[in-house]
Image (cartoon, rainbow, N blue to C red):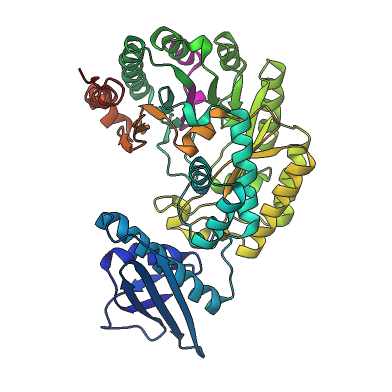
Amino acid sequence: MNILVTGTVDERLHRPLQLIANLFFEETDILLEEENLPDEILKVKLDIQANSVIKVKMALSAPDSAKIYQSSVEKAADPTQTEKEYFKQVKKAVSHAFLEVLQQYTGIRQQWGFLTGIRPTKLLHKKLRSGISKEEAHEQLKKEYLITDEKIQLMEKIVDRQLTIVPDLYHLQNEVSIYIGIPFCPTKCAYCTFPAFAIQGKQGRVASFLGGLHYEMEKIGQFLKDNGIKITTIYYGGGTPTSITAEEMDLLYEQMYRSFPGVENVREITVEAGRPDTITPEKLEVLKKWNIDRISINPQSYIQETLKAIGRHHTVEETIEKFHLARSMGMNNINMDLIIGLPGEGVREFQYSLDKTEKLMPESLTIHTLSFKRASVMTQNKDKYPVASREEAEEMMKLAQDWTAAHNYVPYYLYRQKNILGNLENVGYALPGRESIYNILIMEEVQTIIGLGCGAASKFIDPETGKIERFANPKDPKSYNERYEEYTEKKLQILQQLFCKKQPA
């Protein structure tokens, strides 16, 4: 869909308008110039008056309708704030009006309003921390972002659960968590854009990578010890951390205990064993040896044809077999993932996957909605991967909500992605007391998370101001192997600035 926007249009509005249009149409192109226009085009006239009150008027006309769709939005603003902050208020008002005219034209109601960000629950946390009541916070979210009551109720359930499982959630800024990225998988899935490289034939590169990772762990761990900084959680992700050998895993966890302060007191250590074809009795023995019992075993689907289509080379039977193996060897906190909207799957297939899950009853179940990530094989070859409609995706999400509630799982974290099917969300459900603390911390951005390893992103959060600074290691093993010392030093410099501020004399 082509959309021409004219009037008082700031170039900086192009991206937010594009993101909102993408909620309604498969492919959109926002045009700001009236030259060489295509025949089929929506025309939007925008008028902005910005002073102490921001007034936005918007009118949409379409070639297939004689009707003019209109919206008028007024929002109070402080003209004395910085230009950047003031423009944010303008952007919100324009986004509000644009969503309204597109909802009128298409008849589609966006349950998340014009939110396109990843972390909606963070908004509710922020409002509650300001001291207002839940009722007032809910009303503000509905008014400011046009979020529906249903989604606000979901946010409230999640925030309440997070504060129950981590009662000191707002007071962890002087601790850190650690993310360790292992960038190898048996194969790369069609929907994936994570740092994940097929491990076959790359043992030399794996060994070099692990050497760099051990170096990072030692240097970062020494800094934390020297400055008395506690670790809240440790999370091994990727890739698939169980792609490496049992011997390599053993040495890695030994390095963790040797390098990091107080590992025995860390609240939670998680290892993603997401690909069942990487799980062996020897690797599970290593996990037991180092007191790690929270793992992920991710089926994504229990339809064999789907697994083949998306590039996962394990079988449905193997998923079930490895789950029972892990359980028999003492893994008592297992997460599983299912994805709504995988190619060729609809309500019937998703219900089948839920039925299969019922026979296993993992401690937590994460329901993802398929997201079309720009660099994925699936996005670049959409014609080969037919997916469910918006309506069917919503029906599958409702199935997941009903199934988890019926089996006593509670929602405890939520995040959203760009170009997510049906403009839905990803929700983590868990049996009470089995929630992942790391998942809560990474989503709510309440403390520094230090990323070690290939493709690992660090998120440094100033303990005093809450300002966030991001820093990422290289995504490919070759670049990482060549420069891990440099990247480690940069992280240490940032940590020094954050946690070793000089006290006034």
Say left or right for 310 vs 14: right
Q: Quadrant of the C terminus?
A: top left
Q: Position of residue 74 (x, y in %)?
A: 43, 71
In this view of the protein, which residue sits in the foreground, 263 or 306? 263
Residue 306 shows up from this direction: no
Task: Give the residue furthest to the bottom.
Answer: 66
Magenta stretch containing residue 474, yes or no?
no
Where is residue 142 drawn, in percent x and y? 56, 60
Residues in magenta, as a range: 233-251
Identity of the residue drawn at 52% across and 12% down: 265
> Against 104, is 237 above or below?
above
Q: Which residue: 53% across, 56% down?
A: 141
In-front residue for pair 449/34: 449
The quarter holding residue 166 reads top right
Q: Is residue 23 above or below residue 233?
A: below
Residue 323 placement (x, y as % from top left): 68, 27
